[in-house]
Image (spheres, coloured by chain):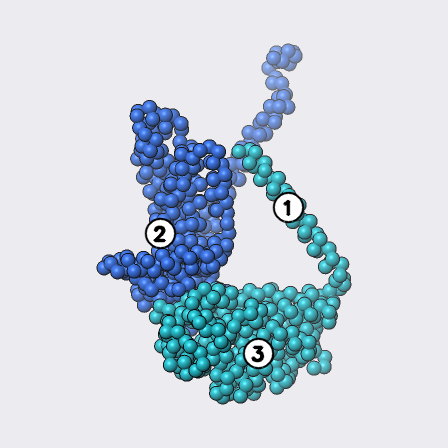
Chain colours: A blue, B cyan
Amino acid sequence: MDKSPHSLTGRRPAPHWLAHLRLALHYGDRPWSALTIGMALLTILLMLSIGLLLWGDSSQARAAFGLSFLKPTSDASWNPVSGNFQAWPFIYGTLATSLMSLVLAVPISLGVAIFLAELCPTWLRMPLGWLFELLAAIPSVVYGLWGIFVFLPTVVEPMGNFLASTLGELPMLTLFFHGPMPASGSSLLAAGLVLSIMITPTIAAITRDVFLAVPLTQREASLALGATSWETIWKVLLPYGMSGILGAVILGLGRALGETMAVTMVVGNSIGGSLSLMRPGYTMSSIIANEFAEAVTVLHSQALIEIALVLFIMTLLLNILARLLVWRVGRGIPQEARA
Amino acid sequence: MLRKYNTLFVVMMVTALLLSACGSSTSTPSSTSLPASSVQINGAGATFPLPVYTEWIYAYQYVDPSVTLNYQGIGSGGGKKAIIDNTVDFAGSDSLVTADEYTAGKDLQMYPMVAGAVVPIYNVEGVTQTLTLDGNVLVGIYNASITKWNDSAIAALNPDINLPDKSITAVHRSDGSGTTEIFTNALSSFSADWKSKVGAGTSVEWPVDKAGNGIGGKGNQGVAAAVQNTPNSIGYVELSYAIANKIAYANMINKAGNKVTANADSLASAMNDFANTFTDELTNIIVDGPGVNSWPIAGYTYIVLHTTSMTDCVKAQKLLDFLKWALSDAGAAKRAADLGYSVLPDAVRTQVLAKLGAVTCNGTPVLSNS
């Protein structure tokens, strides 16, 4: 392309300025990838440093109580005056409220997502989806206030008394459902219900997007084979999107485990030693938020930090467990179906 | 999708504009009204005295416009940590500075500033009159030995009131709090049994929780809301909170056997009962006083200062002037009483002012003539 006599002498012509630019941009790849690796490492480093800090700052409490700190017992003590701390009531409270909220929220969210993605008339889809996303954006303290003044007295208290007088009378279930419900409705049940309302929009919104991402060909193929629309949803869409749906459930669980403000306002903040969901309880995040600011003795604040450590590890384990589940489910779907 | 984000962007821009507009409109007058040589003094700590400190700081602008005071209610523990770390000029605390904290802070000293009362609030079906309670009843309710409103111990104190045969829900603070410390100090004084089994502190292990009739509420407002929403419940809040929110509170029978109402007078009486029992650290517990008119559930809240290591002498001077004003000025006392606190009686004030006089900056006393 260069017609100058230079080309005949074998000397290469100076590169065009555009080529220079390309070259420079190409070398830019390396710093760029280094930058992103650095950011990824930073996240891991952050995680490690949080874990290490919690581990280090709880050394005295760990030495003082050892494994008895975690022991499931009905007469666990949390006594800042005498300096005797056991975490079981908080661990139980966190697990009970989070799992209860999942059990309630997952079916509802699935229903909402299926309706929004598959069955909803198009004109209603936008406003309804928008409303649901708005529900996820409400600050948790608002949920707490609404819980105290509206939801607990009108819904939770009668519901709790009903459950206590029915399920609470059955031989095995009495352990988890015996009354009496406090007149204010503050209980593990209240916390679980409020949490389920809080995590439903999160799970539903992601699940809807998962359904919408399923290729149209899958639906057409199923319908062409003579499946009803219900069979298409149940046997094609649901298995296809399972790993995505599980991801949504994990996100919901994460929110439920860590939620502090709304739970503190409705859970009752009381260490009773009862396993009943109808009774007031306490969660790990609540006790930390409640007592850390005025924890006067070293042992008290260290016991609270150890609870944070337990919560940290528990969240980690549940996430790993859920990842494994997603991975298993993901493998179960034949790859050709995803093509 | 793109349109959605466009809308979002516009909304954000408008919000940002509005925010910046608000920011400039509020900051401009304040920066012009302050003299150039203003001294900024920062404090942080207990939330118990926050209303009265805020009120005093507001009033003090007119006494000495050259000083800007700022107090943040972050909790006593946080306040003590901040003064040890020298991130504030003074701390507020309801709980005592511990031996470890004295060592870490080197030259810390506590000064009682004001006393506050804790009052029982209640919600009993069919009862509109003011209840009267005593120490034994409060201990009984919170250790779950008194479980019904028509218990003979309560009925004996309230012969004219028709009390229902309903079980009592006892509400306590769920967050660690100076209010709980004053309340449990009082319960410990009322009952040796409570003192040995439960004790006193910013948070304690409530026997009534174990019995299944206790509920924790976060903050004064959490306790007040729980009592309001729970028929036949009892709780305790600061007098200042009850006054500000017009919540009815119970009278108490004090040690002398008289029925008393929580107010500035009965608080001053409680302080006078213990005027001669201050420790070297200038701390004191003033619950269950023997005075005829003494409110039994009362407590001091303290200011914590560095006594010898303050280096900015102008600032130290301004800070101590403010504290002296708050302790001595009649207007300051009136403001405190209106909010449900009581400033120190003479017998206590002289001791506190003497200790404040000992504060030095670079080796010379800060208060020239006290």
* Circle on res. B16: 1
Which amino acid, by three-letter code, is at mark 3?
Answer: Asn
B216 and B365: which is toward the camera: B216
Up/down of B201 relative to B73, above or below: below
The chain letter under disc 3 is B
* Residue A221 rendering spot, x and y as whole percentages: 34, 25
Up/down of B136 relative to B53, above or below: below
Q: Which sits earlier in the primary sequence, circle 3 or circle 1?
A: 1
* Residue A163 rendering spot, x and y as whole percentages: 32, 57
Kindly state the secondary structure of the residue where label 2 is placed: helix
Kindly state the secondary structure of the residue where label 1 is placed: helix
Q: Residue at x 61, y 42 (%)?
A: B11
Q: Are marks 3 and 1 on the same chain?
A: yes
Q: Residue at x 65, y 77 (%)?
A: B333
Q: How dense is the environment of label 1, judged by Cα within 10 Å: few (below 14), some, or many (20 and up)?
A: few
* Label pair 2/3, CB-CB below 8 angstroms: no
Q: Name the residue under label 3.
A: B263
Up/down of A221 relative to A43, above or below: above
A254 and A141: which is toward the camera: A141
Q: Label 1, label 2: how many angstroms apart (C-alpha)?
A: 40 Å
State the image quarter where residue B336 is shown.
bottom right
* Residue B101 rendering spot, x and y as whole percentages: 52, 72
Q: Name the residue under label 2.
A: A99
* Residue B85 rendering spot, x and y as whole percentages: 57, 66
B54 and A120: which is toward the camera: A120
Which amino acid, by three-letter code, is at mark 1?
Answer: Ala
State the image quarter where residue B367 is shown.
bottom right
Name the quarter where the C terminus of chain A is drawn. top left
Mark 2 or 3: in front is 3
Kindly state the secondary structure of the residue where label 3 is placed: loop
Q: Label 3, label 1: how many angstroms apart (C-alpha)?
A: 47 Å
